[in-house]
Image (spheres, rainbow, N blue to C red):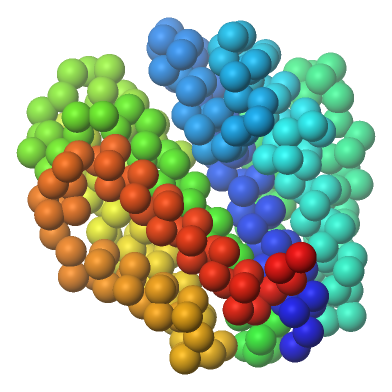
Amino acid sequence: MLSRTADHLYWISRYMERAESIARFLEVANNLALSGGNPEQVWQPVLTIADGTQTEDSVRSDLDTSGVIRWSVLDASNPSSIISCLKYARENAHAVRSVIPNEMWEVINATWLEARTLSWDKLMNRGLIVFCDWVKERSNLYRGVSIGSMIRDEVYSFLRLGTYMERADNSARLLSVRSEAVTADSIESEASEQLHWAAVLKSVGALKAYRLHHKGEISPAGAAQMLILNEAMPRSLHYCMSMVSSVLTELAHDYECTRMAGSLHASLHFGLLNELLDQGLDQFVAKFLLDNNKLGLQVSADFLMTG
């Protein structure tokens, strides 16, 4: 496969996954805001997961509902806004129409055609929650087409690789919010902390699973355990790195990125929470994000267009 083709496939999935992740937390943040949550604590996670390193400072000066929603949904100058992600996903899909199923192209193209007509007034009339549900639905439809119709070849592998690399990054960013002073011993927490961690779990679809498998109140350590080490939870770091390592092994078992992914997966597969959080959740997440970013750069160097 040409590196250019692999690059487009990889970024289709990364952008679709990013759009869904932002929509998921916007939905939860909006519910928290309506419940009377502190505006900065409610909307800061949206800025964190959207990773607006170049524009985040300007947004932080106006952490109200409309300011953050405009920036994370409609701002074309923000490369991680939902509108930008859907646009870039469509551009990448257009470049590889010959190798992806027609149904996949139709889903991505139709999603962008509807999204590009969106304005602030239309968004408010439609309702933020309805819009977020639509983004999740379109992302799930895209993913369902790939799972249900594609031959398990290199095309499918690079799409999966993009999904799980992006998902790991987004899950880690969610964990980083209010992670200071959280350790494996952080069992008890105040009501506001429980509300925050419940929102984090809900944003990745894990709240019901947490309550089924954990007795009692939601704790920072319990949420961290599920989102870091639970190998059955599809948005945990462990699960994502397991998928990344598996895909890279299938593509090329002797590449440097495969070794790096295997090492990162092993640290989660064999790690214990008290060891991983020895210096705190914030330090663990910072290191994971750095390692995941290095892995992404190595994937680009080994497989994709690098310049």
Residue 237 lies in quadrant: bottom left
> Is residue 61 toward the left or the right of residue 125 in the image?
left
Residue plotted at (87% across, 42% down): 114
The residue drawn where x is 44% and y is 41% is 173
Left/right of residue 59 with respect to residue 31 in the rendered view: right
Q: Nearer the viewer, residue 283 or 222?
A: 283
Q: Horizontal placement of 55 versus 104: left or right?
A: left
Q: Quadrant of the N terminus?
A: bottom right
> Which quadrant does the C terminus fall into?
bottom right
- Which one is nearer the viewer's eye here, 17 or 172? 172
Q: Position of residue 276 (x, y in %)?
A: 19, 53
Depicted 157 relative to depicted 207: above or below: below
Residue 143 location in percent, x, y? 64, 65
Quarter occupied by residue 266: bottom left
- When the figure is inspected, residue 241 is found, relative to residue 77, above or below; the finding is below
Is residue 91 something that shows in the picture?
A: yes
Residue 65, percent across and down?
61, 14
